[in-house]
Amino acid sequence: MTKQDLITEIEDILQVDEGSLNEETALASLEDWDSLAFISIIALFDKKLSKKVSLDELKQCQSVGDIIALSGI
């Protein structure tokens, strides 16, 4: 999976238009950045990246780039 693939997956989870997110996008500015998004991203990491990420790690993310950094991509 590439960075862009991951951003596209995050866009789908957050129900935003494709191409509207980039690494600098502040998560707090997104309406659907909530507990359901946290669970969905944790599942995405587990299923598509075979990587475990904790809720606490995800809550510390401030931007889309922070989520990408957690992925190790």
Image: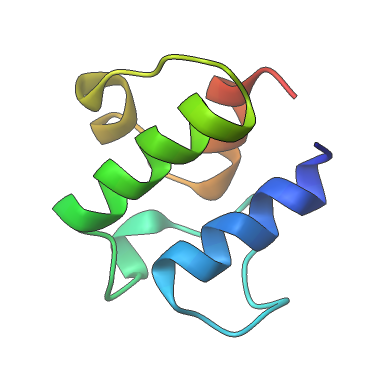
- On screen, residue 41 above or below 11: above
- Residue 14 in picture, x, y percent from top left: 41, 68
Left or right: where 46 falls relative to 20: left
Residue 28 seen from this side: yes
The residue shown at (22%, 26%) is 55
Q: Is residue 2 above or below residue 33?
A: above
Q: Say if residue 66 shows up in the picture.
A: no
Q: Which quadrant does the C terminus fall into?
A: top right
**Corner quadrant of residue 69:** top right
The residue at 31%/20% (across/down) is 57
Rendered image coloring scheme = rainbow
Depth check, front residue: 45 or 7: 45
The answer to which of 70 and 24 lies nearer the viewer is 70
Residue 22 quadrant = bottom right
Rendered image quadrant of residue 33: bottom left
Query: Can you say whether 15 is above or below 47 in the image?
Result: below
Residue 50, image x and y in percent?
A: 58, 18
Name the side, left or right, on which 64 lies relative to 27.
right
Labels in figure, total: 0
Please give the name of the residue rendered at 47% of the width and 46% of the height, measured from the top-left corner. 63
Q: Position of residue 1 (x, y in %)?
A: 80, 36
Q: Is residue 53 left or right of residue 21?
A: left
Residue at the extreme front: 47
Residue drawn at the location 68% of the way across and 47% of the way down: 6
